[in-house]
Amino acid sequence: MNSRTLNSQPGILAGVPRTARYLTFNVVEARRVRQALASLASTADGGEVVVGVGVQLADQLGAAIDGLRPFPRLRGAKVNLPVTAAALWCWIRGEDRGDMLHRSRAIEASIAPAFRAQTVVDGFRHHDGRDLSGYIDGTENPKGVKAQRAALVSGKGAGLDGSSFVAVQQWLHNFSSFDAMSAREQDNAIGRRRRDNVELENAPVSAHVKRTAQESFDPEAFVVRRSMPWVDGQRAGLMFVAFGASFDAFEAQLRRMAGIDDGVVDALFRFTQPLSGSYFWCPPLKRGKLDFSRLLK
């Protein structure tokens, strides 16, 4: 185990869990934030609870985290890309929905009254890691050392090495639009055959796998995806989560998906749209606890 993974929150590189809960928080009592973060550092282990800090919170504390910035408002985008801000993000991971509830209650209690929950979304693993459209998600994820290099910061010094930057978007699927597409149209939109996950050789340029082919960018744009489906009544979709050593790779992919680079919009937008867009910095660990030293200088 190298220093990069030794200091990282282990949930970042771990596989997608059976169930999850995504929480975002806003600051409501600024004078109690430092105390709340000290409590959170003891409550969240980085494995069952992965924690991210938004630029809103860093600015409030007068901290400059190298690489942390707001989610971009991309000029020239041919689709709507909402920007949503939050001070704090928690990704609770586990095997049981009841445990998700109790862990989230414990997190909320540990950081109250400084923070108040803004959004709560429950996620789950669908079959063998499929999106609700039926296609396997994250096929092109880097593995092993490549995943570490893609997802984790290194060479930046104590308090930064082992940290990560995460892009989070909640996507809402329009299943009526998706069902109206033929099986061939659906495969062409993704760029893979649903039945066997084989990439289509002659997929159209708008196919998602072509829009986001990580090795096709200069420089290459590799991220570690840990996305999961979500359901709320009859509304459902994908909670997109992508970890990177910076936000640059994600932004390169998003620009191409939105048609900014060449005018071609990702075919995903035929049946799904993002509801949110947020950036967070996931601090490293120190002696098994969240290391907020760069945030609380």
Image (cartoon, rainbow, N blue to C red):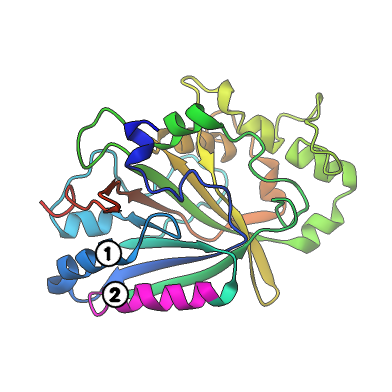
Q: Contact, CB < 8 Å: mark 2 with mark 1?
A: yes
- Circle number at residue 193: none
Residue placed furthest toward the top:
218
**Residue 45 in view of the camera:** yes
Q: Is residue 57 left or right of residue 150?
A: left
- Residue 94 position in % (x across, y down): 54, 63
| Residue under numbered circle 1 | 42
**Residue 246 in view of the camera:** no
Is residue 101 found inside the magenta-colored segment of the image?
Answer: yes
Give the Cα separation between the discs numbered 2 and 1. Answer: 9 Å
Residue depicted at x 79% and y 55%: 178
Per the image, label 2 sits on a secondary structure element best described as helix
Query: Which mark sits nearer the N-terminus, 2 or 1?
Result: 1
Q: Please tell me whether residue 148 is drawn above or below residue 163 in the rendered image.
A: above
- Circle number at residue 110: 2
Per the image, label 1 sits on a secondary structure element best described as helix
Q: Point out the stretch of residues depicted in magenta.
A: 99-115
- Residue 164 position in % (x across, y down): 37, 42
